[in-house]
């Protein structure tokens, strides 16, 4: 199965009232775990790659070749997209696209809406000419993830309408109360605003900061047009917990596979649970 863009999988999710998960990858084992979970659950999957993770792995080109190699060797048959998460500029998005990414997010949310639209329009023109899908953000998601730090700022409805209409993006991430990283207390999502945005823009919506949101809130967000949900922190916590347990039980262990393999399995089980929670199982 060759790599695909997000467009078809998210439009199907919007119509079918489920969400496709974006699970961020950090290394080879992370990618193995996520691809393995998606294949077992027969779910389409989006591999999220932040600029920081790409640097850690070696570069955009290395990321693409690693994913392509695993798809071949693991005999993956489900649709897989590689998506640049929170692309900081046109140049970074272009670099990822040229390396073989099938989807990019241009995050101009920290700029004025006019600058955001201008950046996004440029990315869309380049990406769509190459069959690559584009996500944009309005408002700011709270917390910190990699290079991205922000306080919660709700998306403005008129700005959401403008960016979709003026740029032709495939999917929109309206910031409506979610955060990157762990929640402190109960998440407080703006469902009324989510419904207004969905009705106004008519494109699949994205929920960033999917870790720690209760199932009833996930279900409600999906019912209100959320078709892509991003998960990263939950997998990191699961991996770290198991690695700590293994090293505590085997303090003399030094072969990295001793703790990386159980950690990888923890990620896989976490992703399988998310796939079922989002309803994308058996949708490939």
Image (cartoon, rainbow, N blue to C red):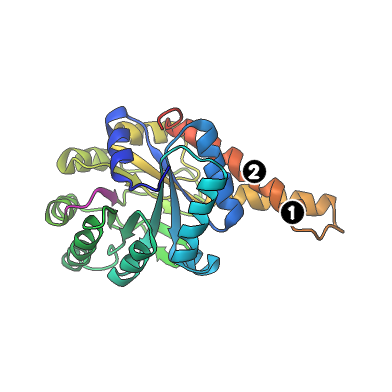
Which quadrant holds residue 283? Answer: top left
Q: Is residue 172 magenta?
A: yes
Q: CA distance from mark 2 to mark 1?
A: 14 Å
Secondary structure state at the residue bearing disc 1: helix
Q: Which residue is mark 2?
A: 266
- The image shows residue 270 at horizontal and vertical percentages of 57, 40
Q: Is residue 81 left or right of residue 259?
A: left
**In the image, which is nearer the foreground, mark 2 or mark 1?**
1
Residue 198 lies left or right of residue 81; in this view the side is: left
Which residue corresponds to the image point at 42% horizontal and 65% vertical from the top-left? 149
Q: Residue at x 29, y 54 (%)?
A: 132
Which image quarter holds the N terminus?
A: top left
Q: Which residue is mark 1?
A: 257
Specify the farthest residue to the bottom.
91
Of labels 2 and 1, earlier in sequence is 1
Q: Is residue 236 visible?
A: no
Q: Is residue 220 magenta?
A: no
What residue is at 32 percent from the left and 58 percent from the top?
105
Q: Residues within 10 Å of mark 2 (few under 14, many from 20)?
A: many
Answer above or below: position of 196 versus 112. above
Residue 135 appears in the rendering: yes
Magenta residues?
168-173
Tell me where residue 27 appears, x and y as whole percent. Answer: 57, 58
Callout count: 2
Q: Secondary structure at mark 2?
A: helix
Give the quarter of the figure containing the C terminus.
top left
Within 10 Å of the Cα at label 1, are there few (<14), some (14-19), or many (20+) other Cα atoms? Answer: few
User: Residue 126, position in %: x, y?
Assistant: 22, 63
């Amino acid at each position: 199965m060759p790599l695909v863009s997000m467009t078809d999988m998210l439009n199907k999710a919007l119509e079918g009232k489920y969400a496709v998960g974006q699970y961020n990858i950090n290394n080879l084992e992370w990618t193995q775990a996520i691809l393995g979970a998606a294949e077992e659950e027969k779910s389409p999957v989006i591999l999220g790659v932040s600029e920081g993770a790409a640097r850690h792995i070696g570069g955009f080109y290395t990321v693409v070749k690693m994913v392509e190699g695993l798809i071949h060797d693991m005999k993956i048959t489900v649709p897989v997209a590689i998506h640049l998460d929170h692309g900081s500029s046109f140049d970074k998005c272009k670099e990822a696209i040229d390396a073989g990414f099938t989807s990019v997010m241009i995050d101009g949310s920290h700029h004025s809406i006019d600058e955001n639209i201008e950046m996004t329009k440029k990315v869309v023109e380049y990406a769509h000419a190459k069959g690559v899908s584009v996500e944009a953000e309005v408002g700011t998601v709270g917390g910190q993830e990699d290079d991205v730090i922000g306080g919660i700022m709700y998306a403005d409805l008129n700005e959401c309408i403008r960016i979709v209409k003026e740029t032709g993006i495939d999917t929109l991430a309206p910031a409506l109360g979610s955060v990157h990283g762990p929640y402190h207390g109960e998440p407080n999502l703006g469902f009324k605003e989510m419904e207004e945005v969905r009705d106004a823009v008519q494109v699949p919506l994205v929920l960033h900061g999917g870790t720690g949101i209760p199932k009833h809130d996930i279900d409600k967000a999906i019912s209100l047009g959320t078709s892509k949900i991003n998960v990263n922190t939950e997998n990191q916590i699961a991996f770290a917990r198991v690695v700590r347990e293994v090293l505590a039980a085997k303090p003399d262990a030094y072969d990295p596979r001793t703790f990386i393999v159980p950690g990888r399995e923890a990620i896989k089980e976490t992703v399988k649970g998310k796939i079922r929670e989002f309803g994308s199982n058996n949708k490939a």
